[in-house]
Image (cartoon, rainbow, N blue to C red):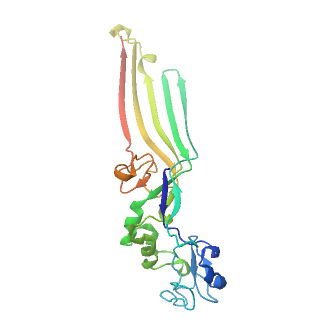
Amino acid sequence: YASFWGTKWTRETSELPTDDQQYASQFQVNDEGFLVWVGEGNSWKDGIAKTLWGKTSSDMSKTYNWGRPIQYIDADGESLHQIGTSVPDFGYAFNFNFRFQGLTIYALFDGQSGGNIYNRTRQWGAREAATGDADQYGKEDGVKKPTIYYRDLYHVNAPNDFYIEDASYTKLRELAVKFNVASLVDMRGFGINGLNVGIVGRNLITWTNYRGYDPEVGRGGGELGSAVNARVDSYTYPNYRTFSFTMDIDF
């Protein structure tokens, strides 16, 4: 229920084919958490220094590309795995009211802890190496990666765990500030007992580690069903910020 399924990338030597685990010394985990083939005596940081990008392995059950992610296939030959869930650990909301003389402030916060969102917007960009992931400017040579590395992770737009992200967030959902002008100015001579003016803002601030615009979005319809369950961000328009002005007059 509400699960993501797709390709997993190998992250430890125990996930290699059984016949290749004897060559564990030729594999290392890189800075993105992926197990990659580096060859005997090399580090995953040696790609540029030793001109290793483009090299391939030999004498193993399959051919490995130097420094590039390896698709995980289990002992039964299964390449499709559960890679995440859109169900959060819990949701929460809290509010507070503040009143001082004629001033009233109301704030509502809500959010969720846990759960995942699939960032397909980011994945589509990887096809043309047009994402922040592929931007290697300013990085040390040891951690720079060629565009083909991120094309592997693009994976012809097939679901994979590189684009599964934490959907936890906290939002300042609403902030309302209201002031009773009649608390300063006696307006009863005009037949007015109270005059409140205010401003209300919604979706003002989002605190999250999600790299897209809004971790609260989803994609519904067809086999995906409800957007609440199908937390797929595929160029989905984020919840927009609004401001409203209010005026209440008591006669």
Q: Quadrant of residue 42?
A: bottom right
Would residue 152 appear left or right of 31 to someone viewing this image? Answer: left
Measured from the top left, where is residue 67 in percent x and y? 53, 81
200 relative to 21, above or below: above
Q: Quadrant of residue 94?
A: top right
221 relative to 10, above or below: above
Measured from the top left, where is residue 78 in percent x and y? 52, 70
Q: Residue at x 39, y 45 (%)?
A: 239
> In terms of depth relative to the viewer, which is nearer, 156 or 127?
156
Quadrant containing the C terminus is: top left
> In terms of depth relative to the viewer, which is nearer, 4 or 30?
4
Measured from the top left, where is residue 132 in percent x and y? 44, 67
Q: Residue furthest front?
A: 76
Q: How many marks?
A: 0
> In terms of depth relative to the viewer, which is nearer, 236 or 25?
25
> In terms of depth relative to the viewer, which is nearer, 192 or 218?
218
Measured from the top left, where is residue 24 in percent x and y? 65, 82
Q: Residue at x 41, y 36 (%)?
A: 201
Q: Residue at x 61, y 73 (%)?
A: 15
